[in-house]
Image (cartoon, rainbow, N blue to C red):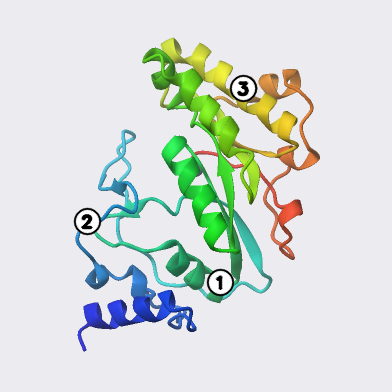
Amino acid sequence: MTPHQAAAAARSVDSGGVSPSAVTPGEIPAAYRPAAAEPLGERGPVRELTEEKSGRKRRLDYPPAPEPLPVPVIDNHAHLDFRDGQVQVTVAEHLDAAQQVGVSGAVLVGYDVASSRFSVEAARTDPRAKAAVALHPNDAPQLAEKGKYASAFEEITTLAEAEHVVAVGETGLDFFRTAEAGRAAQKESFYDHLALAAQRGLPVQIHDREAHADVVRVLKDAPALPRQSSSTATPGTPSWPGYATRTAGT
Ligand SMILES: [Zn+2]
């Protein structure tokens, strides 16, 4: 059996609800190996970038599995709809591998309408996934410029009512990627998301890139948010209501 066939067999077993293929620390899990590549599908955007604007090279291969964590944690910020390079990994495969090294669940983050729908749908089908919905701070100004922001945010508002939505995110400010001209619209969008979070009683996932003072200013100015919103990620016994929500740079 070739590695490709082995990976395909492992995936078909996974999708049948039988125990997932074993993850060995120090080895790349089968689903993440380049040999498991499939033709480009329709499961989400493909991230082909090898170099970011900053000049940093983005790696498109996956690292070996680490040793299992001593205590289980929940990943509070995961983009499982992205696919790096040619390797296609399903949400179930991601969560199977994560579970075997002590990450027992993940909050799937929304950054536009499509990814927010993806999060809601994934959370509906896999109890290890929960959903966050939002328009990303770098997308909001572009939508505003095209006159599409209001309708997109309306869809996010509707999605926020879906079952298994546990946060509004990712929202925030990003002065690294958004130039001065787009920052007023970005700030407006941040306020809108904070108001939505307050209205729904949900915590927020904050994207804060080179905009820290302004993020703090907006937060002080914004409607009262649930207490979890300003906490930082801490490992511990996972419990959905207690997960943390502050992140930066992704
Ligand atoms: Zn992110």
Report the front residue among 81 and 63.
81
Question: For the residues carrying marks 1 and 3, which lies nearer the camera in this image?
Answer: 3
Label 3 lies in ligand 1 vicinity (Cβ under 8 Å): no
Instruction: Please tell me which residue is depicted at 58% across the width and 49% down the height of the picture.
Output: 131
Instruction: Please tell me which residue is depicted at 63% across the width and 21% down the height of the picture.
Output: 191
Residue position marked by numbered label 2 in the rendering: 40
Q: Is residue 173 visible?
A: no
Q: Would residue 40 be found to the left or right of residue 166 on screen? A: left
Above or below 248: residue 14? below
Q: Which mark is residue 192?
A: 3
Report the front residue among 73 and 194.
194
Q: Quadrant of residue 162?
A: top right
Question: In terms of sequence position, does the residue under pointer 2 or pointer 1 come before the other?
Answer: 2
The answer to whether the residue labelled 3 contacts the one labelled 2, judged by CB atoms less than 8 Å apart, is: no
Amino acid type shown at disc 1? Gln
Above or below 229: residue 13? below
Q: Quadrant of the N terminus?
A: bottom left
Q: Is residue 129 visible?
A: yes
Q: Position of residue 95 (x, y in %)?
A: 51, 66
Instruction: Please tell me which residue is depicted at 53% across the width and 26% down the height of the picture.
Output: 153
Label 2 vs label 1: CA separation?
A: 26 Å
Crowdedness near tag 2: few (<14), some (14–19) or many (≥20) residues, C-alpha within 10 Å: some
Above or below 89: residue 228? above
